[in-house]
């Protein structure tokens, strides 16, 4: 079984209420895991409920000294249950309650596209990192919209409305180009060292299709974001799917899947180094 497949089974078993997100995360975390995490004290920026980091640490077989920060107190409370963080903070990422130059690396997975104070957040991550420390981040790319299939019914302006709906549901505030990320990081003392694409067009469209049949329908009916719906229905209460059922679900989701191939990539994996001074 490939790393992507094994991760998909685990995500489906542990968070069966969000199959589309599980598809996305399985590809994403496999990509990150193959590149590993740095040594030393780490900061998880936008740690959420800790579930994703727990799966990543198991995949890379590391257990670092790790601090998590997230704005949502309910998610932070759940993150404490994984026992992977030496400290957790309920705080905005532009006001991290940690001393300057106190971390050897920072990680932010599919978070910065949601953050309104983006410049303040980059400045704050820079402040808490030691010179030479790595900042690893993943974000949707400027090619994300191009990877989407779009609305079933075509009419004038329908694609623009469809993309706006996707962005509202996903709470995506930006799709910066590689140069925009390089410039923004540079403004706050970072030098971009790695910028790689992942989540191909076919993979984005598979996510889009599954998402449309699950969270998309609930969003259309309620106008509420996925996490709000999940909480309202009691889905985020630790319910699990038996492994056999997760295996079956993973195989169904993989039916007809094509190799990733070239073309636009829906996301970027970026590594930036904190410069001295």
Image (tube, rainbow, N blue to C red):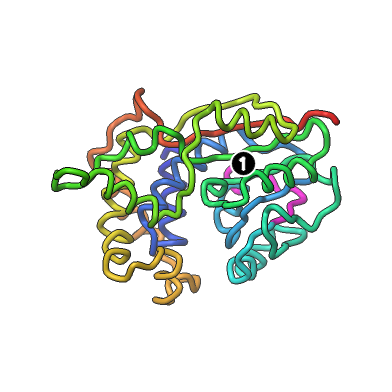
Residue 200 image point, x, y percent:
37, 32
Where is residue 259 drawn, in percent x and y? Answer: 32, 29
Numbered disc total: 1
Residue identified by numbered label 1: 60
Residue 210 falls inside the magenta stretch? no
Q: Locate the C terminus by quadrant.
A: top right
Look at the image and say whether residue 62 sits in the magenta stretch.
Answer: yes
Local crowd at mark 1 within 10 Å, few (<14), some, or many (≥20)?
Answer: some
**Residue at 77% over, 35% down:** 133
Say which quarter of the image contains residue 203. Answer: top left
Relative to residue 36, is residue 171 drawn left or right? Answer: left
Q: Position of residue 163 (x, y in %)?
A: 32, 46
Q: As rendered, which of 82 and 160 lies closer to the eye?
A: 160
Q: Is residue 168 above or below residue 113?
A: below
Looking at the image, residue 52 lies above or below residue 76: above
Magenta residue span: 58-68
Instruction: Identify which residue is drawn at 62% across, 56% down.
Output: 47
Q: Residue at x 69, y 47 (%)?
A: 120
Q: Nearer the viewer, residue 124 or 35?
A: 124
Q: Is residue 112 above or below residue 265?
A: below
In the figure, is residue 160 to the left or right of 180?
Answer: left
Does dot 1 land on a helix, a strand or a loop? helix
Q: Furthest residue to the front?
A: 156
Camera-nearest residue between 120 and 129: 120
Location of residue 241 in the rendering, given as x and y in whole percent from the top left corner: 40, 65
Res 201 → quadrant: top left
Which image quadrant: the N terminus?
Answer: top left
Q: Residue at x 14, y 45 (%)?
A: 155
């Amino acid at each position: 079984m490939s790393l992507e497949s094994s991760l998909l089974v685990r995500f489906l078993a542990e968070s069966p209420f969000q199959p589309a997100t599980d598809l996305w995360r399985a590809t994403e975390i496999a990509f990150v895991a193959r590149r590993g995490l740095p040594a030393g004290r780490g900061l998880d920026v936008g740690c959420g409920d800790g579930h994703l980091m727990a799966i990543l640490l198991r995949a890379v077989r590391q257990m670092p000294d790790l601090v998590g920060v997230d704005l949502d107190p309910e998610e932070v409370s759940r993150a404490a249950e994984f026992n992977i963080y030496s400290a957790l903070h309920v705080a905005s990422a532009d006001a991290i309650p940690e001393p300057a130059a106190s971390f050897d690396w920072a990680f932010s997975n599919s978070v910065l596209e949601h953050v309104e104070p983006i410049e303040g957040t980059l400045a704050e991550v820079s402040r808490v990192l030691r010179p030479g420390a790595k900042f690893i981040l993943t974000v949707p790319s400027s090619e994300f919209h191009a990877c989407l299939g779009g609305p079933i019914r075509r009419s004038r302006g329908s694609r623009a409305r469809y993309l706006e709906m996707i962005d509202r549901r996903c709470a995506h505030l930006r799709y910066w180009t590689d140069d925009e990320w390089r410039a923004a990081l540079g403004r706050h003392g970072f030098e971009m060292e790695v910028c790689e694409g992942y989540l191909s067009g076919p993979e984005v469209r598979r996510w889009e299709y599954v998402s449309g049949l699950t969270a998309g329908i609930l969003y259309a009916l309620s106008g509420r974001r996925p996490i709000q719906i999940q909480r309202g229905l009691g889905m985020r209460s630790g319910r699990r799917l038996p492994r056999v059922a997760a295996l079956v679900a993973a195989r169904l989701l993989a039916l007809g899947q094509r190799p990733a191939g070239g073309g636009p990539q829906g996301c970027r994996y970026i590594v930036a180094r904190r410069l001295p001074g």
